[in-house]
Image (cartoon, grey):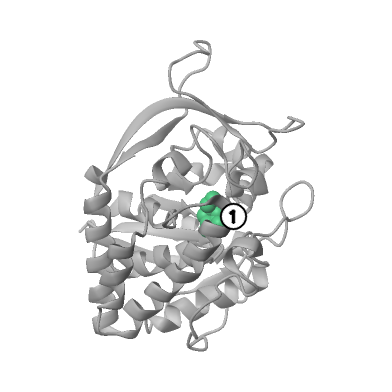
Protein backbone atom coordinates (compact mmCIF):
# COMPACT_ATOMS: atom_id res chain seq x y z
CA UNK A 1 0.00 0.00 0.00
CA UNK A 2 1.39 3.43 -0.94
CA UNK A 3 2.50 5.61 1.97
CA UNK A 4 0.86 9.01 2.42
CA UNK A 5 4.05 10.35 3.99
CA UNK A 6 6.36 12.51 1.87
CA UNK A 7 9.81 10.91 1.57
CA UNK A 8 12.35 13.67 2.19
CA UNK A 9 16.09 14.01 1.89
CA UNK A 10 17.24 17.12 3.76
CA UNK A 11 20.42 18.83 2.59
CA UNK A 12 21.55 21.48 5.06
CA UNK A 13 24.29 23.55 6.74
CA UNK A 14 23.10 24.00 10.34
CA UNK A 15 22.90 26.93 11.19
CA UNK A 16 20.20 28.14 13.58
CA UNK A 17 17.34 28.13 11.10
CA UNK A 18 18.49 24.85 9.51
CA UNK A 19 18.35 23.37 13.01
CA UNK A 20 14.70 24.39 13.37
CA UNK A 21 14.03 22.94 9.90
CA UNK A 22 15.49 19.60 11.03
CA UNK A 23 13.32 19.58 14.16
CA UNK A 24 10.22 20.48 12.14
CA UNK A 25 10.88 17.63 9.69
CA UNK A 26 11.37 15.19 12.57
CA UNK A 27 8.14 16.29 14.19
CA UNK A 28 5.91 16.09 11.12
CA UNK A 29 3.80 12.92 10.88
CA UNK A 30 3.42 13.59 7.14
CA UNK A 31 7.19 13.57 6.49
CA UNK A 32 9.37 10.49 6.22
CA UNK A 33 12.86 11.89 6.80
CA UNK A 34 15.06 9.44 4.90
CA UNK A 35 18.35 11.07 5.81
CA UNK A 36 20.36 14.25 6.08
CA UNK A 37 23.26 15.39 3.92
CA UNK A 38 25.48 18.24 5.04
CA UNK A 39 27.33 20.97 3.23
CA UNK A 40 29.66 23.87 3.92
CA UNK A 41 27.79 27.13 4.21
CA UNK A 42 26.99 28.68 7.55
CA UNK A 43 30.18 26.98 8.78
CA UNK A 44 32.62 24.31 7.58
CA UNK A 45 31.06 21.02 6.53
CA UNK A 46 32.70 19.36 9.54
CA UNK A 47 30.96 21.77 11.91
CA UNK A 48 27.68 21.54 9.96
CA UNK A 49 27.79 17.75 10.30
CA UNK A 50 28.50 17.88 14.01
CA UNK A 51 25.72 20.42 14.44
CA UNK A 52 23.24 18.24 12.54
CA UNK A 53 24.12 15.25 14.72
CA UNK A 54 23.73 17.32 17.89
CA UNK A 55 20.34 18.64 16.78
CA UNK A 56 19.26 15.05 16.15
CA UNK A 57 20.54 14.16 19.62
CA UNK A 58 18.49 17.00 21.10
CA UNK A 59 15.43 15.29 19.62
CA UNK A 60 16.65 11.86 20.77
CA UNK A 61 16.97 10.70 17.16
CA UNK A 62 20.25 8.87 16.69
CA UNK A 63 18.52 6.70 14.07
CA UNK A 64 18.51 9.33 11.29
CA UNK A 65 21.45 8.80 8.95
CA UNK A 66 23.74 11.74 8.19
CA UNK A 67 26.18 11.85 5.27
CA UNK A 68 28.98 14.38 4.92
CA UNK A 69 28.80 16.47 1.77
CA UNK A 70 30.68 19.25 0.02
CA UNK A 71 33.44 21.26 1.71
CA UNK A 72 33.55 23.83 -1.09
CA UNK A 73 31.47 25.03 -4.05
CA UNK A 74 31.74 23.73 -7.62
CA UNK A 75 33.78 26.83 -8.53
CA UNK A 76 35.86 29.13 -6.38
CA UNK A 77 36.36 29.01 -2.65
CA UNK A 78 33.91 28.60 0.20
CA UNK A 79 32.83 31.82 1.93
CA UNK A 80 31.36 30.76 5.26
CA UNK A 81 28.47 32.25 7.23
CA UNK A 82 30.04 32.14 10.69
CA UNK A 83 29.57 35.91 10.80
CA UNK A 84 25.85 35.20 11.24
CA UNK A 85 25.80 31.85 13.06
CA UNK A 86 28.89 32.09 15.30
CA UNK A 87 32.13 30.16 15.67
CA UNK A 88 30.50 26.72 15.75
CA UNK A 89 27.89 27.60 13.13
CA UNK A 90 25.26 27.01 15.82
CA UNK A 91 26.35 29.18 18.74
CA UNK A 92 24.22 29.68 21.82
CA UNK A 93 22.93 27.01 24.17
CA UNK A 94 24.78 23.85 25.15
CA UNK A 95 23.71 20.90 23.01
CA UNK A 96 23.95 17.18 23.74
CA UNK A 97 26.79 15.21 22.19
CA UNK A 98 25.93 13.26 19.01
CA UNK A 99 24.24 9.90 19.49
CA UNK A 100 25.73 8.55 16.26
CA UNK A 101 28.43 9.14 13.67
CA UNK A 102 28.05 10.00 9.97
CA UNK A 103 27.58 7.13 7.54
CA UNK A 104 30.70 5.80 5.87
CA UNK A 105 29.92 7.13 2.41
CA UNK A 106 29.86 10.52 0.72
CA UNK A 107 26.69 12.57 0.49
CA UNK A 108 26.68 11.89 -3.25
CA UNK A 109 26.81 8.11 -2.82
CA UNK A 110 24.25 8.30 -0.03
CA UNK A 111 21.87 10.28 -2.27
CA UNK A 112 22.43 7.89 -5.18
CA UNK A 113 21.77 4.76 -3.09
CA UNK A 114 18.72 6.31 -1.55
CA UNK A 115 17.21 7.39 -4.88
CA UNK A 116 18.04 4.11 -6.60
CA UNK A 117 16.28 2.13 -3.90
CA UNK A 118 13.35 4.54 -3.42
CA UNK A 119 9.91 3.09 -4.19
CA UNK A 120 8.47 6.50 -4.96
CA UNK A 121 10.05 9.82 -5.99
CA UNK A 122 11.87 11.62 -3.21
CA UNK A 123 11.56 15.30 -2.29
CA UNK A 124 14.90 17.02 -1.82
CA UNK A 125 14.79 19.91 0.63
CA UNK A 126 17.88 22.12 0.36
CA UNK A 127 18.54 24.75 3.02
CA UNK A 128 22.18 25.53 2.30
CA UNK A 129 24.40 26.04 -0.75
CA UNK A 130 23.24 23.76 -3.57
CA UNK A 131 26.57 21.95 -4.15
CA UNK A 132 25.49 18.43 -3.16
CA UNK A 133 22.40 18.59 -5.38
CA UNK A 134 24.35 20.10 -8.27
CA UNK A 135 26.84 17.24 -8.06
CA UNK A 136 24.06 14.65 -7.93
CA UNK A 137 22.22 15.99 -10.99
CA UNK A 138 25.47 16.44 -12.94
CA UNK A 139 26.83 12.98 -12.23
CA UNK A 140 23.57 11.04 -12.25
CA UNK A 141 21.06 12.86 -14.50
CA UNK A 142 19.32 9.51 -14.95
CA UNK A 143 18.10 9.82 -11.35
CA UNK A 144 16.12 13.03 -12.00
CA UNK A 145 13.02 10.88 -12.50
CA UNK A 146 13.45 9.64 -8.94
CA UNK A 147 13.30 13.20 -7.59
CA UNK A 148 9.78 14.46 -6.99
CA UNK A 149 11.01 18.04 -6.61
CA UNK A 150 13.79 20.18 -5.21
CA UNK A 151 12.45 22.78 -2.79
CA UNK A 152 15.17 25.14 -1.70
CA UNK A 153 15.68 28.11 0.58
CA UNK A 154 17.68 30.64 -1.35
CA UNK A 155 17.61 33.60 -3.67
CA UNK A 156 15.10 36.39 -3.65
CA UNK A 157 12.69 38.21 -5.94
CA UNK A 158 14.07 41.45 -4.54
CA UNK A 159 17.22 42.21 -2.55
CA UNK A 160 19.95 39.98 -1.16
CA UNK A 161 21.62 39.63 2.22
CA UNK A 162 25.16 38.33 1.73
CA UNK A 163 25.62 41.02 -0.93
CA UNK A 164 23.15 43.81 -1.70
CA UNK A 165 21.60 41.67 -4.44
CA UNK A 166 22.55 38.05 -3.65
CA UNK A 167 21.17 35.81 -0.92
CA UNK A 168 23.76 33.76 1.01
CA UNK A 169 22.92 30.24 -0.25
CA UNK A 170 22.70 31.20 -3.91
CA UNK A 171 25.83 33.33 -3.66
CA UNK A 172 27.69 30.41 -2.06
CA UNK A 173 27.40 28.15 -5.12
CA UNK A 174 25.69 29.74 -8.13
CA UNK A 175 27.08 27.12 -10.53
CA UNK A 176 25.38 24.33 -8.56
CA UNK A 177 22.09 26.23 -8.48
CA UNK A 178 22.39 26.78 -12.23
CA UNK A 179 22.66 23.01 -12.70
CA UNK A 180 19.47 22.49 -10.72
CA UNK A 181 17.52 25.28 -12.44
CA UNK A 182 18.43 24.05 -15.92
CA UNK A 183 18.12 20.31 -15.23
CA UNK A 184 14.40 19.99 -15.80
CA UNK A 185 13.78 18.77 -12.25
CA UNK A 186 10.68 20.38 -10.67
CA UNK A 187 11.89 23.28 -8.51
CA UNK A 188 10.30 25.43 -5.83
CA UNK A 189 12.22 28.46 -4.60
CA UNK A 190 11.70 29.87 -1.12
CA UNK A 191 13.63 33.13 -1.19
CA UNK A 192 14.22 36.03 1.15
CA UNK A 193 11.11 37.81 -0.16
CA UNK A 194 9.15 35.00 1.53
CA UNK A 195 11.30 34.16 4.54
CA UNK A 196 11.45 37.79 5.68
CA UNK A 197 7.77 37.28 6.49
CA UNK A 198 8.74 34.49 8.96
CA UNK A 199 10.00 36.67 11.81
CA UNK A 200 10.66 35.21 15.24
CA UNK A 201 9.02 38.09 17.09
CA UNK A 202 9.31 38.44 20.88
CA UNK A 203 5.91 36.76 21.15
CA UNK A 204 7.15 33.75 19.13
CA UNK A 205 10.30 33.48 21.26
CA UNK A 206 8.18 33.76 24.41
CA UNK A 207 6.07 30.82 23.22
CA UNK A 208 9.26 28.79 22.78
CA UNK A 209 10.54 29.76 26.24
CA UNK A 210 7.25 28.76 27.79
CA UNK A 211 7.56 25.16 26.58
CA UNK A 212 8.35 22.80 29.41
CA UNK A 213 11.19 20.93 27.76
CA UNK A 214 14.72 21.39 26.47
CA UNK A 215 13.73 21.66 22.78
CA UNK A 216 11.68 24.79 23.48
CA UNK A 217 14.37 26.37 25.65
CA UNK A 218 17.09 25.67 23.10
CA UNK A 219 15.04 27.09 20.23
CA UNK A 220 14.37 30.26 22.24
CA UNK A 221 18.10 30.66 22.93
CA UNK A 222 18.94 30.02 19.27
CA UNK A 223 16.52 32.79 18.30
CA UNK A 224 18.29 35.07 20.78
CA UNK A 225 21.69 34.48 19.16
CA UNK A 226 20.28 34.64 15.62
CA UNK A 227 18.30 37.76 16.48
CA UNK A 228 21.39 39.53 17.77
CA UNK A 229 23.17 38.78 14.48
CA UNK A 230 20.24 40.09 12.47
CA UNK A 231 20.07 43.25 14.56
CA UNK A 232 23.82 43.86 14.25
CA UNK A 233 24.16 43.07 10.54
CA UNK A 234 20.85 44.08 8.98
CA UNK A 235 19.04 46.17 11.62
CA UNK A 236 16.17 43.67 11.95
CA UNK A 237 14.08 43.89 15.12
CA UNK A 238 13.34 40.15 14.89
CA UNK A 239 15.22 37.43 12.97
CA UNK A 240 13.71 35.84 9.86
CA UNK A 241 13.63 32.07 10.33
CA UNK A 242 14.23 31.13 6.72
CA UNK A 243 14.89 27.43 6.36
CA UNK A 244 11.84 25.85 8.08
CA UNK A 245 9.62 27.60 5.49
CA UNK A 246 10.62 24.87 3.02
CA UNK A 247 9.58 22.05 5.34
CA UNK A 248 6.43 23.90 6.39
CA UNK A 249 5.43 24.16 2.72
CA UNK A 250 5.47 20.37 2.50
CA UNK A 251 3.46 19.90 5.68
CA UNK A 252 0.82 22.57 5.07
CA UNK A 253 0.74 23.61 1.40
CA UNK A 254 -1.82 26.36 2.06
CA UNK A 255 0.71 28.35 4.12
CA UNK A 256 2.39 29.77 1.04
CA UNK A 257 1.16 31.33 -2.21
CA UNK A 258 3.34 30.56 -5.21
CA UNK A 259 3.93 32.07 -8.63
CA UNK A 260 5.25 30.12 -11.61
CA UNK A 261 8.18 31.97 -13.18
CA UNK A 262 11.44 31.72 -15.04
CA UNK A 263 14.31 31.79 -12.55
CA UNK A 264 18.00 32.12 -13.42
CA UNK A 265 21.08 32.76 -11.35
CA UNK A 266 23.74 35.28 -12.29
CA UNK A 267 27.14 33.61 -12.80
CA UNK A 268 29.10 36.51 -14.22
CA UNK A 269 28.12 39.86 -12.75
CA UNK A 270 30.85 42.08 -11.34
CA UNK A 271 28.56 43.07 -8.45
CA UNK A 272 25.73 40.61 -8.84
CA UNK A 273 27.21 37.08 -8.92
CA UNK A 274 24.86 34.65 -7.18
CA UNK A 275 21.80 36.87 -7.60
CA UNK A 276 18.58 35.15 -8.63
CA UNK A 277 16.77 36.75 -11.55
CA UNK A 278 13.06 36.03 -11.18
CA UNK A 279 10.85 36.94 -14.12
CA UNK A 280 7.61 37.62 -12.22
CA UNK A 281 6.03 39.60 -15.07
CA UNK A 282 7.24 37.61 -18.09
CA UNK A 283 9.68 40.25 -19.32
CA UNK A 284 11.60 37.42 -21.02
CA UNK A 285 8.74 35.91 -23.06
CA UNK A 286 11.16 33.56 -24.79
CA UNK A 287 11.96 31.89 -21.46
CA UNK A 288 9.50 29.32 -20.15
CA UNK A 289 8.84 29.17 -16.40
CA UNK A 290 11.13 26.65 -14.70
CA UNK A 291 10.14 27.08 -11.05
CA UNK A 292 7.44 27.95 -8.59
CA UNK A 293 8.46 30.92 -6.47
CA UNK A 294 7.15 31.48 -2.95
CA UNK A 295 5.45 34.88 -2.68
CA UNK A 296 3.24 35.21 0.40
CA UNK A 297 3.39 33.49 3.78
CA UNK A 298 0.57 33.10 6.29
CA UNK A 299 2.93 33.94 9.15
CA UNK A 300 0.42 33.27 11.92
CA UNK A 301 -0.32 29.78 10.63
CA UNK A 302 3.40 29.21 10.00
CA UNK A 303 4.32 29.92 13.60
CA UNK A 304 1.39 27.93 14.92
CA UNK A 305 2.64 24.95 12.93
CA UNK A 306 6.31 25.37 13.89
CA UNK A 307 5.61 25.96 17.59
CA UNK A 308 3.08 23.14 17.94
CA UNK A 309 5.52 20.80 16.19
CA UNK A 310 8.43 21.79 18.42
CA UNK A 311 6.27 21.36 21.50
CA UNK A 312 5.11 17.90 20.46
CA UNK A 313 8.66 16.85 19.56
CA UNK A 314 10.16 18.26 22.75
CA UNK A 315 7.50 16.68 24.91
CA UNK A 316 8.28 13.25 23.47
CA UNK A 317 12.09 13.55 23.34
C1 LIG B 1 20.20 31.39 4.45
O1 LIG B 1 21.58 31.55 4.79
C2 LIG B 1 21.83 31.02 6.06
O2 LIG B 1 22.34 32.01 6.90
C3 LIG B 1 20.55 30.48 6.60
O3 LIG B 1 20.75 29.22 7.21
C4 LIG B 1 19.63 30.37 5.41
O4 LIG B 1 19.70 29.09 4.81
C5 LIG B 1 19.52 32.75 4.51
O5 LIG B 1 20.08 33.62 3.59
CA1 LIG C 1 20.80 27.23 5.89
Q: Is residue 148 above or below residue 105?
A: above
Q: Position of residue 25 (x, y in %)?
A: 35, 64
Q: Looking at mark 1, is its residue's CB closer than 8 Å to ligand 1?
A: no
Decide which of 232, 43 is in the foreground and name it.
Answer: 232
Q: What residue do we see at 62% from left, 46% from top?
A: 134
Q: Report x, y in % for residue 240.
A: 43, 54
What is the quadrant of residue 305 in the picture? bottom left
Q: Left or right: where does residue 75 sit relative to residue 193?
A: right
Above/below status of 160 relative to 133: above
Quarter-of-image position of residue 109:
bottom right
Q: Quadrant of the N terminus?
A: bottom left
Of residues 109 and 273, the one drawn nearer to the viewer in this rendering:
273
Q: Which residue is mark 1?
A: 233
- At a point 22% along the width and 67% down the height, the residue shown is 308
The residue under the point 44% across, 57% down is 239
Observer able to see residue 63: yes
| Badge 1 density bin: few <14, some 14–19, many ≥20, Cα 10 Å | few
Residue at image point 49% right, 10% down: 285
Q: Secondary structure at mark 1?
A: helix
Q: Quadrant of the C terminus?
A: bottom left
Q: Position of residue 269 (x, y in %)?
A: 73, 30
Most foreground residue, 35 or 160: 160
Q: Does 196 appear above or below 2?
A: above
User: Residue 162 location in percent, x, y?
Assistant: 63, 47
Amino acid sequence: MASARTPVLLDCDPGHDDAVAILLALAAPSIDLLGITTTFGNCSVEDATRNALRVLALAGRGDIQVAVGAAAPLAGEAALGNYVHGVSGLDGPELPEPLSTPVDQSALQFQVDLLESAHSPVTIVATGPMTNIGLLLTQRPDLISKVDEVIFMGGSTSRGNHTPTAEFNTHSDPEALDVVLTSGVPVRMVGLNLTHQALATPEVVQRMSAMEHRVGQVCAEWMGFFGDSYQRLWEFDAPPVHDPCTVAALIEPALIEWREAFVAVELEGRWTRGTTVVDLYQRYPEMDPNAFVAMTLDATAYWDLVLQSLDTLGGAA
